[in-house]
């Protein structure tokens, strides 16, 4: 479908399906749906210093990406077919994802605020979009389904129990969430740095489990093995069933971004089954091209 038609259809669908009252719109669009198979705990997706992709990806760096992600650019610069997510859309009851992505400009349909993004013509890996909801969105490079760029709306940190709830003692601004992560003994964090992403301002940091959190809960946490302690991080007040954890050798880069009218957007580059630095290298140029629609601020 031509991009102009897709933009019109996306805006029309948002107008039809999402109530102008944002919270009510979230509830309508995310209610009565089955969990999707792509991600972890409580949801299908519930998906220091960045390595620049630059010339190294296209030249010598491209061979290392091919080894890990299973695809390569053709001599003409286009991307050969690869194995994207196992399902075109992760939730058949809400089939609003774009599925496999061609190089060029794209736009989310339901995520609020809408995301404009660009898949480079010379990307060394194929990309797909398995999830697009008002509160969750994913851009997935060919490789493990668990490892991708994840977008979440209006998250709050969680209590550290097997059935976590929102920790009402911690606010939902970027600074407050980052401070909670820095002070949590269950986490190793890099320095918290100012960040601007897609037009929104906030902070960026990398996190990993420190190993001091030892609570083992029933194994219903997606990609995590039986008996592994996994630390609750945050849930999405506007993201349906999203519940996010960290454990084992997992590493995550988090952009915690404030919305001008209140609330937040979180972007996570999450590596469970992929080398973290390689995932950062693969995702950086796509991340650099992201913009959030100012009409929804």
Image: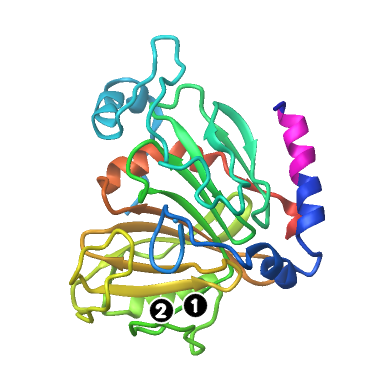
Dots 2, 1 in contact, CB < 8 A: yes
Density class for disc 2 (Cα within 10 Å; few <14, some 14-19, many ≥20) is some
Q: Residue at 49% across / 84% down in the picture?
A: 170
In the displayed structure image, the side of residue 20 where residue 282 appears, left or right: left
Density class for disc 1 (Cα within 10 Å; few <14, some 14-19, many ≥20) is some
Quarter of image, res 42 = bottom left
In the displayed structure image, the side of residue 156 where residue 32 appears, left or right: right
Q: Position of residue 68 (x, y in %)?
A: 25, 34
Above/below status of 86 relative to 54 = below
In the displayed structure image, the side of residue 146 where residue 237 appears, left or right: right
Separation of marks 2 and 1 at Cα, in angstroms: 6 Å
Q: Residue at 56% across / 74% down in the picture?
A: 173
Q: Residue at 76% across / 53% down in the picture?
A: 14
> Can you say which quadrant of the picture contains the N terminus?
top right
Residue 7 highlighted magenta (yes or no) = yes
Q: Position of residue 256 (x, y in %)?
A: 50, 63
Q: Residue at 35% across / 27% down in the picture?
A: 57
Which residue carries the number 1 mark? Answer: 176
Above/below status of 196 relative to 129 = below
Q: Position of residue 174 (x, y in %)?
A: 52, 70
Residue 152 highlighted magenta (yes or no) = no
Element type at mark 2:
helix
Which residue carries the number 2 mark? Answer: 180
User: How many marks do you count on the picture?
Assistant: 2
Residue 40's tag is none
Front position in the image: 35 or 61 = 35
State which region is magenta: 3-10
Front position in the image: 107 or 175 = 107
């Amino acid at each position: 479908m031509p991009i102009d038609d897709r933009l019109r259809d996306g805006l029309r669908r948002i107008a039809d399906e999402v109530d102008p009252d944002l919270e009510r719109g979230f509830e309508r669009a995310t209610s009565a749906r089955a969990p999707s198979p792509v991600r972890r705990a409580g949801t299908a997706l519930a998906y220091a210093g960045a390595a620049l992709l630059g010339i190294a990806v296209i030249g010598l760096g491209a061979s290392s990406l091919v080894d890990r992600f299973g695809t390569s650019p053709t001599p003409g610069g286009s991307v050969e077919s690869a194995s994207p997510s196992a399902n075109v859309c992760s939730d058949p009851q809400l089939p609003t994802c774009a599925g496999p992505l061609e190089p060029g400009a794209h736009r989310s349909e339901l995520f609020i605020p809408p995301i404009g993004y660009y898949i480079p013509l010379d990307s060394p890996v194929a990309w797909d979009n398995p999830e697009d909801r008002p509160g969750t969105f994913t851009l997935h490079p060919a490789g493990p389904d668990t490892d991708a760029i994840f977008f979440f709306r209006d998250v709050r940190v969680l209590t550290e129990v097997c059935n976590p709830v929102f920790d009402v003692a911690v606010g939902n601004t970027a600074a407050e969430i980052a401070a909670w992560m820095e002070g949590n003994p269950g986490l190793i964090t890099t320095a918290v740095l100012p960040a601007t992403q897609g037009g929104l301002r906030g902070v960026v940091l990398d996190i990993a489990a420190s190993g001091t959190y030892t609570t083992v809960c029933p194994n219903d946490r997606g990609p995590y093995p039986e008996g592994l302690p996994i630390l609750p991080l945050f849930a999405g007040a506007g993201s349906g069933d999203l519940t996010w954890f960290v454990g084992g050798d997992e590493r995550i880069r988090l952009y915690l971004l404030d919305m001008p009218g209140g609330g937040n957007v979180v972007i996570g580059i999450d590596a469970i089954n992929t080398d973290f630095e390689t995932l950062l290298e693969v995702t950086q140029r796509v991340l650099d091209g992201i913009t959030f629609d100012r009409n929804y601020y």
